[in-house]
Amino acid sequence: MNKEQRLQKYLSEHPDIDLFKKYKQKYRKRVLTEEQRKRYNELNRILYRKNNPIEKRKVGVKLSKEEIKQRKSERSKKWYNSEKGKLHRQKNNRSRRVGAVGKVKWEDWIELKKKYNNTCLCCKKQEPEIKLTSDHIIPVSKGGKHCIENIQPLCMKCNCSKFTKIIDYRKDHML
């Protein structure tokens, strides 16, 4: 018995399903009585089971809030490190929007962080404790270029406190 024959047999045994398919939209739009709603839900379950074999159905396991949070975190980290994430960060980079001259590659930024041991050059805290951001030594607003030679790794707090001052913390690090 092929697929079409089985379907015909099933539909002949369950004549409500064919009608249900035709009038599904009408069922949803109009106000149903309790009896009609039960029948509607029952037909929905039958259709779902027919179209989704047991292998395809998800097992209804409830996750804890921590597990959900961890899964979301893993997905966002995966996206952040993907090519699309890198392109998104480059596109939305403030330096690009204000029209700064130059370009910094992601690999160059990683190398610069490694060069300074993933340390903020101002407060000397390391990266697991803080999140490093790229800081322009000569700010773009004051004519600085957006190139790796004009960038130093600072934490968000130090970067914000520096604001538009021209301070080169790399000199202190070399001593």
Image: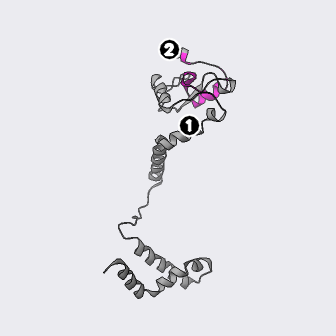
> Label 1 vs label 2: CA separation?
29 Å
Instruction: Estimate the x, y position of residue 13 in percent, counting from the top left.
Output: 40, 87
Near mark 2 (Cα within 10 A), the count class, few <14, some 14-19 or many ≥20, is few
Instruction: Estimate the x, y position of residue 7 in percent, counting from the top left.
Output: 39, 81
The residue beneath circle 2 is 174
Give the number of the disc on residue 74. none
The residue beneath circle 1 is 90
Q: Residue furthest left?
A: 1
Which residues fall within the magenta stretch? Answer: 146-170
Secondary structure beneath disc 1?
helix
What residue type is disc 1 on? Gln
Q: Pick the residue in front: 162 or 48.
A: 48
What residue type is disc 2 on? Met
- Identified at 44% across, 52% down, the residue is 67
Image quarter hosting the N terminus: bottom left
Question: Does the stretch in magenta take in 163?
Answer: yes
- Left or right, 13 with respect to 167, comes to left
- Identified at 55% across, 78% down, the residue is 24
